[in-house]
Image: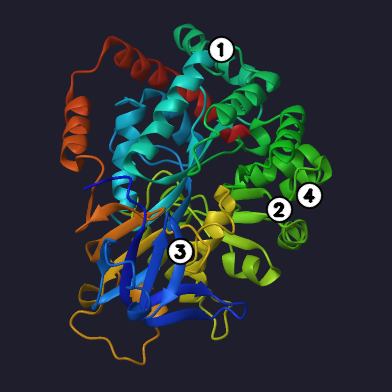
Amino acid sequence: MNKDVNSCIVEADIALVGADASGQMQLRHDVAIRIHEGVIAQIGPLRGMLGGNEHLPRYGGKGFIAMPGLVNSHHHFGITPLMAGIPFEPLEFWLPQFRAMRSVGPRLDTLFSAIEMLESGTTTVHHIASGLAGDSDAWHSTADEVIAAYDEIGMRAGYSAMLRDRNVLAYDGDDAVLSDMPPAARDWFAARLYPKGAGVDAYINFHETLRARHAANTRLRVNYAPANLHWCSDGLLEAVASAARSSGSQIHMHLVETKRQADFARQRFGKSAVRYLEGLGLLGSNVTFGHCNWLDEGDAEVLASCGCSVCHNASSGLRLGSGRAEIAKLAKAGVRVALGIDQSNIADDRDMLLEIKLVWALHRGTELFSERVEATEVLRQASENGARTVGFGGLSGRLECGQRADVVLLDRRLVERPFVDARTPISDVVLHRARRDAVRTVLVDGRLVVANGRVTRVDRDDVLERVRVKMSEAPRSADVEAAEMVALAMPAVRKHNSLS
Protein backbone atom coordinates (compact mmCIF):
# COMPACT_ATOMS: atom_id res chain seq x y z
CA MET A 1 0.00 0.00 0.00
CA ASN A 2 1.34 3.41 -1.00
CA LYS A 3 0.83 5.71 1.98
CA ASP A 4 1.12 8.80 -0.21
CA VAL A 5 -1.83 7.99 -2.49
CA ASN A 6 -4.44 10.69 -1.82
CA SER A 7 -6.75 10.33 -4.82
CA CYS A 8 -9.57 7.81 -4.62
CA ILE A 9 -13.34 7.24 -4.80
CA VAL A 10 -15.53 6.72 -1.73
CA GLU A 11 -18.97 5.11 -2.05
CA ALA A 12 -21.80 5.03 0.48
CA ASP A 13 -25.55 4.44 0.84
CA ILE A 14 -25.80 7.73 2.74
CA ALA A 15 -23.39 10.62 3.19
CA LEU A 16 -23.84 13.12 6.02
CA VAL A 17 -22.67 16.31 4.33
CA GLY A 18 -23.09 18.64 7.31
CA ALA A 19 -25.76 20.86 8.81
CA ASP A 20 -27.40 23.59 6.69
CA ALA A 21 -28.25 27.11 7.83
CA SER A 22 -31.48 25.91 9.43
CA GLY A 23 -29.68 23.24 11.46
CA GLN A 24 -30.89 20.30 9.37
CA MET A 25 -28.45 17.61 8.30
CA GLN A 26 -27.85 17.62 4.56
CA LEU A 27 -27.75 14.11 3.09
CA ARG A 28 -26.69 12.47 -0.16
CA HIS A 29 -28.03 9.01 -0.99
CA ASP A 30 -26.39 6.29 -3.10
CA VAL A 31 -23.45 8.59 -3.53
CA ALA A 32 -19.86 8.51 -4.65
CA ILE A 33 -17.20 11.03 -3.63
CA ARG A 34 -14.20 11.54 -5.90
CA ILE A 35 -11.11 12.77 -4.09
CA HIS A 36 -8.28 14.37 -6.04
CA GLU A 37 -4.99 15.02 -4.30
CA GLY A 38 -6.62 15.19 -0.90
CA VAL A 39 -9.55 17.43 -1.88
CA ILE A 40 -13.17 16.47 -2.49
CA ALA A 41 -13.49 17.14 -6.21
CA GLN A 42 -16.85 15.63 -7.12
CA ILE A 43 -19.94 14.26 -5.39
CA GLY A 44 -22.67 12.39 -7.25
CA PRO A 45 -23.60 9.08 -8.86
CA LEU A 46 -20.75 6.64 -9.30
CA ARG A 47 -21.41 6.16 -13.00
CA GLY A 48 -20.53 9.80 -13.61
CA MET A 49 -17.09 9.39 -12.08
CA LEU A 50 -15.65 6.22 -13.53
CA GLY A 51 -14.69 7.49 -16.96
CA GLY A 52 -10.94 7.92 -16.80
CA ASN A 53 -10.85 7.16 -13.06
CA GLU A 54 -11.02 3.38 -13.15
CA HIS A 55 -7.49 3.21 -11.75
CA LEU A 56 -8.36 5.00 -8.50
CA PRO A 57 -8.64 3.06 -5.24
CA ARG A 58 -12.28 2.66 -4.13
CA TYR A 59 -13.49 2.52 -0.54
CA GLY A 60 -16.87 1.77 0.97
CA GLY A 61 -19.79 0.78 -1.26
CA LYS A 62 -23.23 -0.55 -0.53
CA GLY A 63 -23.90 -0.82 3.19
CA PHE A 64 -21.79 2.13 4.32
CA ILE A 65 -22.48 5.52 5.88
CA ALA A 66 -20.03 8.31 5.09
CA MET A 67 -19.53 11.24 7.47
CA PRO A 68 -16.96 13.99 8.06
CA GLY A 69 -14.06 13.09 10.31
CA LEU A 70 -14.66 13.99 13.94
CA VAL A 71 -12.59 16.60 15.78
CA ASN A 72 -11.26 16.39 19.34
CA SER A 73 -10.84 20.10 19.98
CA HIS A 74 -9.20 19.83 23.41
CA HIS A 75 -6.63 17.09 24.13
CA HIS A 76 -3.56 16.93 26.35
CA PHE A 77 -1.64 13.63 26.42
CA GLY A 78 -1.95 9.87 26.07
CA ILE A 79 -1.21 8.10 29.37
CA THR A 80 -4.20 9.04 31.48
CA PRO A 81 -3.84 9.99 35.15
CA LEU A 82 -5.94 6.97 36.08
CA MET A 83 -3.55 4.68 34.20
CA ALA A 84 -0.64 6.34 36.01
CA GLY A 85 -2.11 5.89 39.49
CA ILE A 86 -3.33 9.47 40.05
CA PRO A 87 -6.70 9.37 41.88
CA PHE A 88 -9.62 11.52 40.80
CA GLU A 89 -9.95 14.65 42.91
CA PRO A 90 -11.18 18.19 42.40
CA LEU A 91 -9.08 19.89 39.75
CA GLU A 92 -7.11 22.07 42.17
CA PHE A 93 -5.90 18.98 44.08
CA TRP A 94 -5.58 16.78 40.99
CA LEU A 95 -3.26 18.82 38.76
CA PRO A 96 -0.28 19.14 41.16
CA GLN A 97 -0.13 15.35 41.41
CA PHE A 98 0.58 15.10 37.68
CA ARG A 99 4.20 15.86 38.56
CA ALA A 100 4.40 12.30 39.90
CA MET A 101 3.22 10.75 36.61
CA ARG A 102 5.66 8.60 34.71
CA SER A 103 6.25 9.15 30.99
CA VAL A 104 6.65 6.85 28.03
CA GLY A 105 8.11 9.67 25.92
CA PRO A 106 6.36 12.08 23.52
CA ARG A 107 6.22 9.79 20.47
CA LEU A 108 4.72 6.73 22.15
CA ASP A 109 2.38 8.81 24.26
CA THR A 110 1.06 10.65 21.21
CA LEU A 111 0.71 7.55 19.06
CA PHE A 112 -1.21 5.76 21.83
CA SER A 113 -3.96 8.38 22.03
CA ALA A 114 -3.91 8.96 18.26
CA ILE A 115 -4.68 5.28 17.67
CA GLU A 116 -7.71 5.56 19.95
CA MET A 117 -8.86 8.70 18.18
CA LEU A 118 -8.45 7.51 14.60
CA GLU A 119 -10.03 4.12 15.23
CA SER A 120 -13.12 5.84 16.63
CA GLY A 121 -13.42 8.26 13.71
CA THR A 122 -11.52 11.32 14.97
CA THR A 123 -9.33 12.75 12.21
CA THR A 124 -8.34 16.11 13.74
CA VAL A 125 -7.07 16.98 17.21
CA HIS A 126 -5.98 20.10 19.02
CA HIS A 127 -3.05 18.87 21.07
CA ILE A 128 -2.63 21.25 24.01
CA ALA A 129 0.62 20.27 25.69
CA SER A 130 0.18 20.55 29.45
CA GLY A 131 3.15 22.86 29.73
CA LEU A 132 6.75 23.50 28.75
CA ALA A 133 9.54 21.79 30.66
CA GLY A 134 13.30 22.13 30.71
CA ASP A 135 15.00 24.73 28.53
CA SER A 136 13.97 26.05 25.12
CA ASP A 137 15.81 23.25 23.32
CA ALA A 138 13.67 20.75 25.22
CA TRP A 139 10.50 22.70 24.36
CA HIS A 140 11.31 22.36 20.67
CA SER A 141 12.43 18.73 20.75
CA THR A 142 9.29 17.66 22.60
CA ALA A 143 7.02 19.60 20.24
CA ASP A 144 8.83 18.17 17.21
CA GLU A 145 8.33 14.62 18.47
CA VAL A 146 4.63 15.14 19.07
CA ILE A 147 4.10 16.77 15.67
CA ALA A 148 6.11 14.03 13.96
CA ALA A 149 3.99 11.35 15.65
CA TYR A 150 0.76 12.89 14.34
CA ASP A 151 2.32 13.15 10.89
CA GLU A 152 3.50 9.54 11.09
CA ILE A 153 0.05 8.18 11.93
CA GLY A 154 -1.66 10.55 9.49
CA MET A 155 -3.80 12.82 11.70
CA ARG A 156 -4.59 16.47 11.17
CA ALA A 157 -3.51 18.44 14.24
CA GLY A 158 -3.22 21.74 15.99
CA TYR A 159 -0.35 22.09 18.45
CA SER A 160 -0.06 24.48 21.37
CA ALA A 161 1.48 24.49 24.85
CA MET A 162 -0.20 25.78 28.00
CA LEU A 163 1.55 28.98 29.08
CA ARG A 164 1.66 30.08 32.73
CA ASP A 165 3.52 32.80 34.57
CA ARG A 166 1.76 32.93 37.96
CA ASN A 167 -0.30 31.01 40.56
CA VAL A 168 0.65 27.51 39.42
CA LEU A 169 -0.06 25.91 42.81
CA ALA A 170 -2.90 28.00 44.21
CA TYR A 171 -4.95 31.11 43.54
CA ASP A 172 -3.20 33.10 46.28
CA GLY A 173 0.25 32.73 44.70
CA ASP A 174 3.06 30.20 44.59
CA ASP A 175 5.19 31.71 47.36
CA ALA A 176 2.51 31.23 49.98
CA VAL A 177 2.17 27.53 49.14
CA LEU A 178 5.90 26.93 48.91
CA SER A 179 6.46 28.51 52.32
CA ASP A 180 4.17 25.93 53.92
CA MET A 181 5.89 22.92 52.32
CA PRO A 182 8.62 20.88 54.03
CA PRO A 183 12.04 22.18 52.89
CA ALA A 184 12.79 19.24 50.58
CA ALA A 185 9.46 19.57 48.75
CA ARG A 186 9.78 23.37 48.66
CA ASP A 187 13.16 23.19 46.94
CA TRP A 188 12.02 20.48 44.53
CA PHE A 189 8.84 22.30 43.47
CA ALA A 190 10.46 25.74 43.31
CA ALA A 191 12.97 24.44 40.77
CA ARG A 192 10.20 23.02 38.56
CA LEU A 193 7.26 25.43 38.73
CA TYR A 194 8.31 27.25 35.56
CA PRO A 195 10.51 26.11 32.67
CA LYS A 196 14.05 27.41 32.38
CA GLY A 197 14.21 30.69 30.52
CA ALA A 198 10.45 31.20 30.90
CA GLY A 199 9.02 34.60 30.09
CA VAL A 200 6.63 36.33 27.74
CA ASP A 201 9.21 36.95 25.01
CA ALA A 202 10.54 33.39 25.22
CA TYR A 203 7.04 31.92 24.96
CA ILE A 204 6.13 33.99 21.91
CA ASN A 205 9.47 33.28 20.22
CA PHE A 206 9.02 29.54 20.79
CA HIS A 207 5.69 29.51 18.94
CA GLU A 208 6.93 31.72 16.11
CA THR A 209 10.01 29.57 15.58
CA LEU A 210 7.99 26.34 15.77
CA ARG A 211 5.47 27.68 13.26
CA ALA A 212 8.19 28.72 10.83
CA ARG A 213 9.98 25.39 11.09
CA HIS A 214 6.80 23.43 10.30
CA ALA A 215 5.34 25.85 7.76
CA ALA A 216 5.35 23.21 5.02
CA ASN A 217 3.10 20.85 7.00
CA THR A 218 -0.38 21.61 5.69
CA ARG A 219 -2.03 19.27 8.21
CA LEU A 220 -0.64 21.26 11.15
CA ARG A 221 -1.56 24.50 12.85
CA VAL A 222 0.63 25.99 15.60
CA ASN A 223 -1.71 27.80 18.00
CA TYR A 224 -1.49 29.56 21.37
CA ALA A 225 -2.80 28.24 24.69
CA PRO A 226 -2.54 30.74 27.55
CA ALA A 227 -3.46 28.34 30.31
CA ASN A 228 -6.17 30.22 32.25
CA LEU A 229 -6.91 33.67 33.64
CA HIS A 230 -5.51 32.95 37.11
CA TRP A 231 -2.39 31.36 35.60
CA CYS A 232 -1.54 34.21 33.22
CA SER A 233 -0.51 37.80 33.84
CA ASP A 234 -2.08 40.59 31.83
CA GLY A 235 1.22 41.05 30.03
CA LEU A 236 1.28 37.44 28.85
CA LEU A 237 -2.35 37.54 27.71
CA GLU A 238 -1.88 40.78 25.79
CA ALA A 239 1.28 39.46 24.11
CA VAL A 240 -0.48 36.26 23.06
CA ALA A 241 -3.45 38.19 21.68
CA SER A 242 -1.14 40.39 19.61
CA ALA A 243 1.02 37.50 18.37
CA ALA A 244 -2.03 35.45 17.38
CA ARG A 245 -3.49 38.33 15.39
CA SER A 246 -0.18 38.90 13.62
CA SER A 247 0.24 35.25 12.65
CA GLY A 248 -3.43 34.46 12.00
CA SER A 249 -3.32 31.77 14.68
CA GLN A 250 -5.96 30.39 16.99
CA ILE A 251 -6.01 30.88 20.76
CA HIS A 252 -7.40 28.14 23.01
CA MET A 253 -7.65 29.05 26.68
CA HIS A 254 -9.11 27.16 29.65
CA LEU A 255 -11.65 29.37 31.42
CA VAL A 256 -13.91 29.07 34.50
CA GLU A 257 -13.55 25.30 34.51
CA THR A 258 -14.32 25.25 38.24
CA LYS A 259 -16.42 27.46 40.49
CA ARG A 260 -13.27 28.57 42.28
CA GLN A 261 -11.88 29.94 39.01
CA ALA A 262 -15.03 32.01 38.48
CA ASP A 263 -14.78 33.25 42.08
CA PHE A 264 -11.13 34.25 41.49
CA ALA A 265 -12.12 36.63 38.69
CA ARG A 266 -14.94 38.25 40.64
CA GLN A 267 -12.83 38.65 43.79
CA ARG A 268 -9.68 39.87 42.01
CA PHE A 269 -11.22 42.04 39.28
CA GLY A 270 -14.78 42.71 40.38
CA LYS A 271 -16.22 41.23 37.20
CA SER A 272 -16.54 37.91 35.38
CA ALA A 273 -13.54 36.30 33.69
CA VAL A 274 -15.13 36.89 30.29
CA ARG A 275 -15.73 40.58 31.01
CA TYR A 276 -12.16 41.01 32.23
CA LEU A 277 -10.69 39.38 29.12
CA GLU A 278 -12.96 41.56 26.99
CA GLY A 279 -11.36 44.59 28.62
CA LEU A 280 -7.89 43.25 27.82
CA GLY A 281 -8.78 42.95 24.14
CA LEU A 282 -8.31 39.18 24.05
CA LEU A 283 -11.75 38.25 22.68
CA GLY A 284 -12.14 37.60 18.96
CA SER A 285 -13.21 35.12 16.31
CA ASN A 286 -9.88 33.28 16.62
CA VAL A 287 -10.42 32.59 20.34
CA THR A 288 -11.84 29.41 21.88
CA PHE A 289 -12.44 28.99 25.58
CA GLY A 290 -12.27 25.48 26.98
CA HIS A 291 -14.78 24.28 29.60
CA CYS A 292 -16.73 27.49 30.53
CA ASN A 293 -18.67 25.59 33.18
CA TRP A 294 -19.23 28.67 35.37
CA LEU A 295 -20.03 31.57 33.08
CA ASP A 296 -21.80 34.58 34.58
CA GLU A 297 -25.11 35.96 33.36
CA GLY A 298 -24.53 37.84 30.12
CA ASP A 299 -21.18 36.17 29.36
CA ALA A 300 -22.63 34.09 26.53
CA GLU A 301 -23.87 37.20 24.76
CA VAL A 302 -20.43 38.84 25.10
CA LEU A 303 -18.74 35.76 23.63
CA ALA A 304 -21.22 35.65 20.76
CA SER A 305 -20.80 39.33 19.95
CA CYS A 306 -17.02 38.87 19.74
CA GLY A 307 -17.25 35.70 17.63
CA CYS A 308 -15.57 33.51 20.27
CA SER A 309 -16.08 29.74 20.45
CA VAL A 310 -16.48 27.48 23.46
CA CYS A 311 -15.09 23.95 23.65
CA HIS A 312 -17.27 21.76 25.86
CA ASN A 313 -15.50 18.92 27.72
CA ALA A 314 -18.41 16.91 29.09
CA SER A 315 -16.64 13.84 30.47
CA SER A 316 -13.96 15.92 32.14
CA GLY A 317 -16.44 18.11 33.96
CA LEU A 318 -18.35 15.10 35.25
CA ARG A 319 -15.37 12.99 36.29
CA LEU A 320 -13.69 15.80 38.22
CA GLY A 321 -16.90 17.30 39.57
CA SER A 322 -15.98 20.60 37.92
CA GLY A 323 -19.38 21.30 36.37
CA ARG A 324 -20.77 21.49 32.87
CA ALA A 325 -21.09 24.13 30.19
CA GLU A 326 -24.67 25.11 29.33
CA ILE A 327 -24.17 24.50 25.63
CA ALA A 328 -27.83 24.78 24.67
CA LYS A 329 -27.89 28.32 26.07
CA LEU A 330 -24.54 29.11 24.45
CA ALA A 331 -25.75 27.89 21.05
CA LYS A 332 -29.00 29.84 21.42
CA ALA A 333 -26.97 32.99 22.14
CA GLY A 334 -25.02 32.42 18.93
CA VAL A 335 -21.80 31.01 20.37
CA ARG A 336 -20.10 28.36 18.25
CA VAL A 337 -19.62 25.24 20.39
CA ALA A 338 -17.02 22.54 19.77
CA LEU A 339 -16.33 19.34 21.68
CA GLY A 340 -13.21 18.05 23.39
CA ILE A 341 -12.38 14.92 25.31
CA ASP A 342 -9.78 16.73 27.44
CA GLN A 343 -7.56 14.19 29.19
CA SER A 344 -9.91 11.25 28.58
CA ASN A 345 -13.61 10.53 28.35
CA ILE A 346 -16.04 8.75 30.63
CA ALA A 347 -14.48 5.39 29.65
CA ASP A 348 -10.91 6.70 30.13
CA ASP A 349 -10.13 6.65 26.43
CA ARG A 350 -10.46 8.99 23.41
CA ASP A 351 -13.62 7.65 21.75
CA MET A 352 -15.53 10.65 20.33
CA LEU A 353 -18.42 8.42 19.27
CA LEU A 354 -18.97 7.75 22.97
CA GLU A 355 -18.45 11.38 23.96
CA ILE A 356 -21.16 12.67 21.63
CA LYS A 357 -23.67 10.31 23.21
CA LEU A 358 -22.82 11.68 26.64
CA VAL A 359 -23.06 15.27 25.40
CA TRP A 360 -26.53 14.70 23.95
CA ALA A 361 -27.82 12.98 27.09
CA LEU A 362 -26.27 15.45 29.51
CA HIS A 363 -28.07 18.39 27.96
CA ARG A 364 -31.61 17.05 27.69
CA GLY A 365 -32.98 19.07 30.61
CA THR A 366 -35.71 18.00 33.01
CA GLU A 367 -38.45 20.44 32.02
CA LEU A 368 -41.08 19.69 29.40
CA PHE A 369 -39.78 22.48 27.17
CA SER A 370 -36.11 22.55 28.20
CA GLU A 371 -33.57 24.01 25.81
CA ARG A 372 -31.96 21.00 24.16
CA VAL A 373 -29.15 20.21 21.77
CA GLU A 374 -30.28 17.81 19.07
CA ALA A 375 -28.27 15.14 17.29
CA THR A 376 -27.40 17.16 14.19
CA GLU A 377 -26.06 20.03 16.31
CA VAL A 378 -23.93 17.67 18.42
CA LEU A 379 -22.48 16.15 15.24
CA ARG A 380 -21.73 19.64 13.91
CA GLN A 381 -20.00 20.52 17.19
CA ALA A 382 -17.88 17.38 16.86
CA SER A 383 -16.86 18.09 13.26
CA GLU A 384 -17.28 21.43 11.46
CA ASN A 385 -17.24 23.62 14.59
CA GLY A 386 -14.26 21.77 15.99
CA ALA A 387 -12.29 22.11 12.76
CA ARG A 388 -12.73 25.87 12.94
CA THR A 389 -11.41 26.10 16.51
CA VAL A 390 -8.27 24.13 15.59
CA GLY A 391 -7.52 26.37 12.62
CA PHE A 392 -9.04 24.44 9.70
CA GLY A 393 -12.25 26.41 9.32
CA GLY A 394 -13.59 26.19 5.76
CA LEU A 395 -11.06 23.47 4.94
CA SER A 396 -12.43 20.43 6.75
CA GLY A 397 -15.42 19.30 8.78
CA ARG A 398 -17.91 18.84 5.94
CA LEU A 399 -18.27 16.49 2.96
CA GLU A 400 -18.54 18.97 0.10
CA CYS A 401 -16.49 19.96 -2.91
CA GLY A 402 -13.41 21.98 -2.10
CA GLN A 403 -13.05 20.57 1.41
CA ARG A 404 -10.07 18.47 2.45
CA ALA A 405 -11.08 14.83 2.30
CA ASP A 406 -11.32 13.75 5.95
CA VAL A 407 -13.89 10.97 5.69
CA VAL A 408 -15.17 8.25 8.01
CA LEU A 409 -16.99 5.18 6.68
CA LEU A 410 -19.29 3.36 9.10
CA ASP A 411 -20.56 -0.16 8.53
CA ARG A 412 -24.30 0.46 8.33
CA ARG A 413 -25.11 -3.12 9.28
CA LEU A 414 -23.26 -2.76 12.57
CA VAL A 415 -24.78 0.64 13.29
CA GLU A 416 -28.35 -0.50 12.66
CA ARG A 417 -28.20 -4.10 13.92
CA PRO A 418 -30.60 -5.77 14.21
CA PHE A 419 -33.01 -3.14 12.82
CA VAL A 420 -33.71 0.60 12.63
CA ASP A 421 -36.90 1.99 11.12
CA ALA A 422 -36.39 4.05 7.96
CA ARG A 423 -38.26 6.96 9.58
CA THR A 424 -35.50 7.42 12.17
CA PRO A 425 -33.29 10.36 11.12
CA ILE A 426 -29.82 9.22 10.16
CA SER A 427 -28.23 11.85 12.44
CA ASP A 428 -29.97 10.23 15.39
CA VAL A 429 -28.98 6.77 14.22
CA VAL A 430 -25.29 7.71 13.94
CA LEU A 431 -25.17 9.65 17.21
CA HIS A 432 -26.98 7.07 19.33
CA ARG A 433 -25.93 3.78 17.75
CA ALA A 434 -22.55 4.17 16.05
CA ARG A 435 -19.77 2.61 18.08
CA ARG A 436 -16.07 2.24 17.51
CA ASP A 437 -16.49 -1.23 15.99
CA ALA A 438 -18.56 0.31 13.16
CA VAL A 439 -15.65 2.52 12.02
CA ARG A 440 -14.21 0.53 9.13
CA THR A 441 -12.35 3.09 6.98
CA VAL A 442 -10.91 6.52 7.73
CA LEU A 443 -9.28 8.91 5.29
CA VAL A 444 -7.34 12.06 6.15
CA ASP A 445 -6.47 14.32 3.23
CA GLY A 446 -7.67 11.45 1.03
CA ARG A 447 -5.06 9.08 2.47
CA LEU A 448 -6.09 5.78 4.02
CA VAL A 449 -5.25 5.89 7.74
CA VAL A 450 -7.70 3.26 9.06
CA ALA A 451 -8.64 0.06 7.19
CA ASN A 452 -10.88 -2.66 8.59
CA GLY A 453 -11.05 -0.75 11.85
CA ARG A 454 -7.28 -0.56 12.45
CA VAL A 455 -4.74 2.17 11.85
CA THR A 456 -2.62 1.53 8.76
CA ARG A 457 0.46 3.69 9.16
CA VAL A 458 1.80 2.36 12.46
CA ASP A 459 1.78 -1.07 14.11
CA ARG A 460 -0.89 -0.55 16.75
CA ASP A 461 -0.07 -3.73 18.66
CA ASP A 462 3.60 -2.80 18.82
CA VAL A 463 2.77 0.69 20.11
CA LEU A 464 0.47 -0.65 22.80
CA GLU A 465 2.99 -3.29 23.84
CA ARG A 466 5.77 -0.71 24.05
CA VAL A 467 3.55 1.43 26.27
CA ARG A 468 2.81 -1.56 28.51
CA VAL A 469 6.48 -2.52 28.80
CA LYS A 470 7.58 1.05 29.50
CA MET A 471 4.96 1.62 32.18
CA SER A 472 5.70 -1.77 33.77
CA GLU A 473 9.37 -1.00 34.32
CA ALA A 474 10.60 -0.43 37.86
CA PRO A 475 10.43 3.27 38.74
CA ARG A 476 13.63 5.20 38.22
CA SER A 477 15.12 7.12 41.12
CA ALA A 478 13.72 10.36 39.64
CA ASP A 479 10.24 8.81 39.57
CA VAL A 480 10.52 7.74 43.20
CA GLU A 481 11.71 11.21 44.19
CA ALA A 482 8.86 12.89 42.31
CA ALA A 483 6.26 10.72 44.05
CA GLU A 484 7.81 11.47 47.46
CA MET A 485 7.98 15.21 46.85
CA VAL A 486 4.38 15.40 45.63
CA ALA A 487 3.20 13.49 48.71
CA LEU A 488 5.10 15.89 50.96
CA ALA A 489 3.75 18.94 49.14
CA MET A 490 0.05 18.02 48.94
CA PRO A 491 -0.93 19.12 52.49
CA ALA A 492 0.21 22.67 51.67
CA VAL A 493 -1.53 22.55 48.28
CA ARG A 494 -4.77 21.40 49.91
CA LYS A 495 -4.54 24.04 52.61
CA HIS A 496 -4.04 26.98 50.27
CA ASN A 497 -6.62 25.90 47.72
CA SER A 498 -9.13 25.44 50.51
CA LEU A 499 -8.47 28.97 51.77
CA SER A 500 -8.37 30.73 48.42
Query: What is the distance, in whole Å, between disc 3 and disc 4 at their CAs?
Result: 41 Å
Q: Which residue is mark 1?
A: 196
Mark with earlier residue (2, 1): 1
Q: Quadrant of residue 419?
A: bottom left
Q: Secondary structure at mark 3?
A: strand
Q: Please state the horizontal and vertical placement of residue 369, each as a whole percent of the image.
A: 57, 85
Q: Amino acid at mark 3?
A: Ile
- Between disc 3 and disc 4, the foreground one is 3
Labelled pair 3, 4 in contact (Cβ < 8 Å): no
Residue 82 visible to the viewer: no
Choose mark 2 or mark 1, whichever is in front.
2
Mark nearer the N terminus (2 vs 4): 4
Mark with earlier residue (3, 4): 3
Question: Residue 497 — which label?
Answer: none
The residue where tag 4 is placed is 275
Q: Residue at x 36, y 28 (%)?
A: 106
Residue 209, percent from left and from top: 60, 24
Q: Nearer the viewer, mark 2 or mark 4?
A: 2
Residue 285's disc number: 2
Residue 407 visible within the image: yes
User: What is the three-letter code of the residue carrying label 2?
Assistant: Ser
Asked if the residues shown at circle 2 and circle 1 are in contact, with their CB atoms under 8 angstroms apart, the answer is no
Quadrant in the picture for the C terminus: top right
